[in-house]
Amino acid sequence: MAQEQVKIPQATARRLPLYYRFLNNLHSQGKQRVSSAELSEAVKVDSATIRRDFSYFGALGKKGYGYNVNYLLGFFRKTLDQDELTKVALIGVGNLGTAFLNYNFLKNNNTKIEIGFDVDESKVGTAIGDVPIYHMDELQEKLIEEGITVAILTVPAPVAQPITDSLVEANIKGVLNFTPARLNVPPSIRVHHIDLAVELQSFVYFLKHYPITEKELL
Amino acid sequence: MAQEQVKIPQATARRLPLYYRFLNNLHSQGKQRVSSAELSEAVKVDSATIRRDFSYFGALGKKGYGYNVNYLLGFFRKTLDQDELTKVALIGVGNLGTAFLNYNFLKNNNTKIEIGFDVDESKVGTAIGDVPIYHMDELQEKLIEEGITVAILTVPAPVAQPITDSLVEANIKGVLNFTPARLNVPPSIRVHHIDLAVELQSFVYFLKHYPITEKELL
DNA sequence: TATTCTTTGTGATATATTTAACAGAACATC
DNA sequence: GATGTTCTGTTAAATATATCACAAAGAATA
């Protein structure tokens, strides 16, 4: 498993998949080179931040030229383990879950939803976006069988914790939690929480209380 | 429109809706008081961070006692403008959009999706979770008519920019963008970008490259 | 009332992240 | 080549965020 020499800041790590996607776009548009300023325009991240981010991986660009799209893409492919597939399970095939299944992470990706689970008998046995749906009763068995260690949790809030306990027993290592519940897990397990209601509410709060500054208007 | 005396840090502002929700939970469980340590356990935020967050609004607690749930709830209700409803439009009634419509922000909320838009004729004229769906052609007319200034964008990536341009013309002030596209908008308009694919990919990157530290295992 | 216990609010500090600014390397042009 | 231009990589500084640690206020108990 690839491990950086020097630890990459988390903020940088979060932007890597974004850079990767836009580099892919540029590549398929036939672009050969790109400057941090151009990339900044596309991904809406300050160009100094982009240069700094890239510099954690060494000198990837050339002064006066910019970055070679192919080279950068190849580099990130390796760095982001694009060759090594991570299998993901989706727990809860409601509207949000179905959105994930239909998205199913396009081409060029190292991440694939392999299996879905729900309690709804009308969904069990079907496939959505080529992903087979199993009954929640088979959760542990199937996860262990497939060696899946990452789960996306899109179930109703009241069952989030019991299902998480079950995931933990099935040896899961990370849970991407889209329910409003805050999960209790052993410290060896990573949970990342994305709360759509909170996102909307804090966005509205920002709109009301944080007027656009002079500086931003420039 | 309420405006703080002192600017609240953004990180704090993002946590406010979370606190508010958990305080509501406590209240409906009949709890009278809560300490920062208890709240910390529930929302998974360090207790010192919670105390600091609260302290931006003044001395809301009592030493040796904690916080009075009712008082705090009342205070946040005012602070978060829970009495003033913000109307939101949902653009794009696919799976993700439908998830939002069905969620529709429960009781006690200052945020409500009032109207949805899609191009799919089979959806136009129906209502999902009590929210009426109109054709995208009527976007500008309806938004202006209803005085809606916040939009959730859940459309396919290729149409994200043209639709955003249309939203801007209709006087929208904020866009919560769930498409992978990075939007170009005038500087007076706020965009918050939530990219589900990037979230998943960077989460997987974390799992692989950031082993749990000693400290976290305590 | 005296004593002990609890828990806040915050100064001090640590950690993390962003941004400005620019020297110098490499490109482009003549 | 010589000259001017472009654009990186990075130093320094600013900004933002989180956490420790503890005095002091008040609650609880005896």
Image: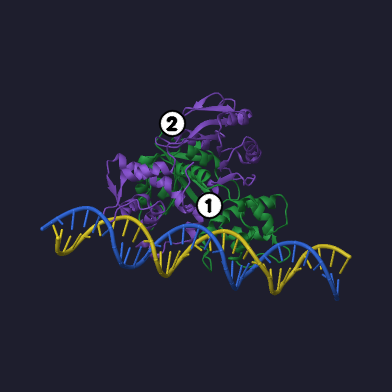
Chain colours: A purple, B green, C blue, D yellow
Q: Kindly report which numbered mark, 1 or 2, lies closer to the viewer in this rendering.
A: 1
Mark seen at residue B122: 2
User: Image quadrant of residue A138?
Assistant: top right
**Quarter of image, res C20:** bottom left
The answer to which image quadrant residue A47 occupies is bottom left
* Dot 2 alpha-carbon crowd within 10 angstroms: few under 14, some 14 to 19, many 20 or more: few
Between residues A60 and B176, which one lies in front from this camera angle? Answer: A60
Give the letter of the chain under mark 1: A
Vertical relation: A150 (above or below) A4: above
Circle 1: residue type:
Gln
Residue A162, can we see it? yes
In depth, the one of B6 and A133 nearer the eye is A133
Q: Secondary structure at mark 2?
A: loop
Examine the rendered structure and indicate whether residue B127 appears above or below residue B149.
above
Give amino acid for label 2: Ser
* Residue C24 in picture, x, y percent from top left: 29, 63
Q: CA distance from mark 1 to mark 2?
A: 30 Å
Q: Position of residue A71 (x, y in %)?
A: 32, 44
- Chain where mark 2 sits: B
Instruction: Locate residue B86, reporting x and y percent.
Output: 51, 52
**Observer-nearest residue: B41 or A63?**
A63
Left or right of residue B81, residue A63 in this image: left
Q: Secondary structure at mark 1?
A: helix
Numbered label tally: 2
Q: Which mark is residue A201?
A: 1
Left or right, residue A185 beside residue B198: right
**Does mark 2 fall on the same chain as mark 1?**
no
C-beta proximity under 8 Å, tags 1 and 2: no
Label 1 packing within 10 angstroms: few (<14), some (14-19), many (20+): many
Left or right: A128, with C1 as reference point: left
Whether residue B179 can be seen here: no
- Of residues A95 and B109, the one drawn nearer to the viewer in this rendering: A95
